[in-house]
Image: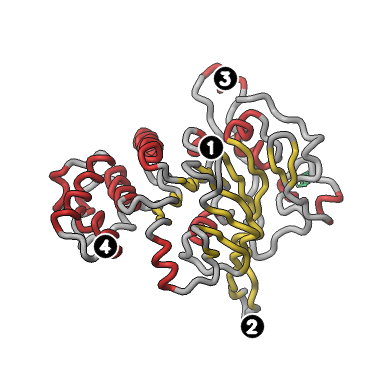
Amino acid sequence: MSENVLSVRDLCVYFEVRGEGWFPERKQLRAVDGVSFDLGPAETLGVVGESGCGKSTLARAVVALVPVTSGEIHFDGHNLVGLGAEQIRQQRRHLQIIFQDPLASLDPRMTVGQIIGEPLRSFFPRMSGQERRAKVLEMMRQVGLLADYINRYPHEFSGGQAQRIGIARALILQPEVVVCDEPVSSLDVSIKAQIVNLLMELQQVYGVSLIFVAHDLASVRHISHRVLVLYLGKVMELASSDAIYRAPRHPYTQSLIHAVPVADPRQARAHPAKGLEGEPPSPIAPPSGCVFRTRCRYAIERCAQETPMLRQVGESLVACHLAEQIRVPAER
Ligand code: SF4
């Protein structure tokens, strides 16, 4: 891949939360804690982890929808961290987001044509109504929506169709990067596949780079070139999609892969899907050393004392003291 379109460096997003009791203490919740990655042109980076691991906060921080505590987000020659509201608005033309709940993210008072055309109205106020309508209709065609739908309202559509409207709106300005924040989590399995395939087709057409957030590895497998695995706001592993599935190094990645059901019934009997036991600890009081140690079957004393740094092991960047010693499981 040539030069990166987006580079995130040591990104931290902390929130102040109030404790409980009569005299509640203010505590710090580390939603995203020192995350770095690059995104190449027309590349898809999958971001996975359980609920509460910080993936949606990371997605929203990248498009400047949540305030960043520290770190850098380099995009289009600017560090987005520290830019003013108008400069960020200008960058949004090239940096868009698709949300998890398609119906909730669309304004119920606007028609499909108005929703999809709204970014054009905002960034190209002199564009004629006729030209805007033509662009909206072309975008609707590309996402598989009938031209007849242009005057309908969001409540008249299914979840899958509403997500197509959200995709059309995100792509109408032909952005360089689209952050997809769990865009298929609320959809049925068959619709999920259609939306993932649509995003892949549109990536081919527009050369857009995608950050695709999901809570399970099965959803990102098909679409991602590389995968970043998050746990309690920290990167556990980052590798090509192929390497993550073929040779997962981190015990957490291995558990996520083990939780993915396999389609072949014979293989499913031989390797039954098994989720990770227990809940992640609170991000308000994360474990010392390796944040995964309370659920890791390989944990040793060192894991409680020393935070593992992200380092190259085989084909992956892994944050685990024992990454060289832990056996890579057979491919499922
Ligand atoms: Fe497990 Fe220790 Fe590796 Fe953390 S550093 S994943 S606790 S072995």
Question: From the viewer's perspective, is residue 17 above or below residue 215?
Answer: below
Q: Is residue 97 left or right of residue 120?
A: right
Judged by depth in the image, the label closer to the viewer, 4 or 2, is: 4
Disc 3 crowd rating (10 Å Cα; few below 14, some 14-19, many 20+) is: few
Q: Earlier in the sequence, mark 4 or mark 2?
A: 2
> To which residue does mark 2 refer?
23
Q: Count up the numbered dots.
A: 4
Give the alpha-carbon distance from disc 4 to disc 2, as whole Å: 52 Å
Which residue, as the protein is rendered here, is positioned at the far right?
A: 301
Q: Which of the 4 image quarters holds residue 257? A: top right
Q: Quadrant of ligand 1?
A: top right
Question: From the viewer's perspective, is residue 11 above or below residue 192?
Answer: below
Give amino acid for label 3: Gln
Q: Earlier in the sequence, mark 2 or mark 1?
A: 2
> To which residue does mark 4 refer?
124
Q: In the image, residue 109 lies at what x, y percent?
A: 20, 63
Give the alpha-carbon distance from disc 1 to disc 3, as whole Å: 25 Å
Residue 123 seen in the figure? yes
Residue 267 - label: 3
